[in-house]
Amino acid sequence: MTNKDTQLIEQFQIGDRFNARKTNSSDESCYQAEFIGCIPGQCLLFRLQDLNGKTAKIPKDETLELRTVMNGEIIAFQSRVTYLANKPFQLIYLDMPEKIFSGNHRVWPRVPVVEYINIETDNGKLNGPGHFRKGRIANISLSGARVDASEKLGNPGDRIKIQAQLSDDQLMGKTIDANAIIRQTGNIQKQTFQKRPPWVSHGIEFDLLTMKEEQKILLQAYVYEQAKNQKYPARKH
């Protein structure tokens, strides 16, 4: 582990939330890992729950991949479970990772999806605050998404709120609830056989500062699951 990796670990705060998944089995479930602390030079301490908030059962020697967003960067590493304690509460000991990946989340893959969503505008310029509309997410990343709607939701700099009930098999019934800022807009090219006006696309950036930790973990789990299943190449945005 390099000095940079050690410095990153030193920035971990008690209560920080990570997205976790197993790497050594066919079980592709996602987990929420809460950072409890560390024994310097020896191990990291976590509590692990499934996405329903129940204590996760992880065997000793299982290797976990953990990811989070910290200071605007993706932090990711793999680590092996060395010890399990269940009393008075679950405590998982992970060995110190050999390498920690960090990178700007703006160059993370943007994954094509089709998720129908509810959108609340709050700009007061078009139809007033609290105006709800239907739309769809056309692609998504850890920092933002392309949202398509039948009419313009606002102008660059305006704020919206989206609610997306996920259709992914692993996360069925979960809802991403996020505030976002419109960064750009543009008409979707109209096909010659279409009678309706073209939809409007909106490039939005998630407001990660106001997003709850549970929602960040759910967003991470969804993006990783879609990227893994579809295997689309990364695209900068």
Image: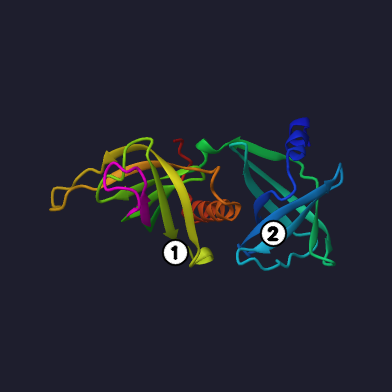
Q: Is residue 130 above or below residue 51?
A: above
The answer to whether residue 22 shows anywhere in this view is no
Magenta-drawn stretch contains 127: yes
**What kind of element bears circle 1?**
loop
Q: Is residue 135 above or below residue 207?
A: below
The answer to whether residue 201 shows anywhere in this view is yes
Q: Give the mark nearest the N terminus, 1 or 2.
A: 2
Instruction: Please report the residue visible at 54 percent of the width from the left and 46 percent of the height from the top.
Output: 210
Q: Which residue is mark 1?
A: 167
Which of the numbered marks, if any, corresponds to residue 24? 2
Looking at the rendered image, the quarter that the N terminus falls into is top right
Magenta-drawn stretch contains 43: no
Depth check: give the residue in front, 120 or 94. Answer: 120
Instruction: Please report the residue visible at 28 percent of the width from the left and 38 percent of the height from the top.
Output: 186
Instruction: Give the magenta-colored segment's residue range.
Output: 118-131
Task: Give how far across and how far down residue 46 sits, in percent.
Answer: 76, 55
Name the amino acid type tagged 2.
Answer: Asn
Side of 68 relative to 81 (left or right): left
Q: Crowding near pointer 2: few (<14 within 10 Å), some, many (20+)?
A: few
Depth check: give the residue in front, 8 or 192. Answer: 8
Q: Crowding near pointer 1: few (<14 within 10 Å), some, many (20+)?
A: some
**Mark 1–mark 2 distance (CA, rounded to whole Å):** 26 Å
Instruction: Please report the residue visible at 64 percent of the width from the left and 65 percent of the height from the top.
Output: 53
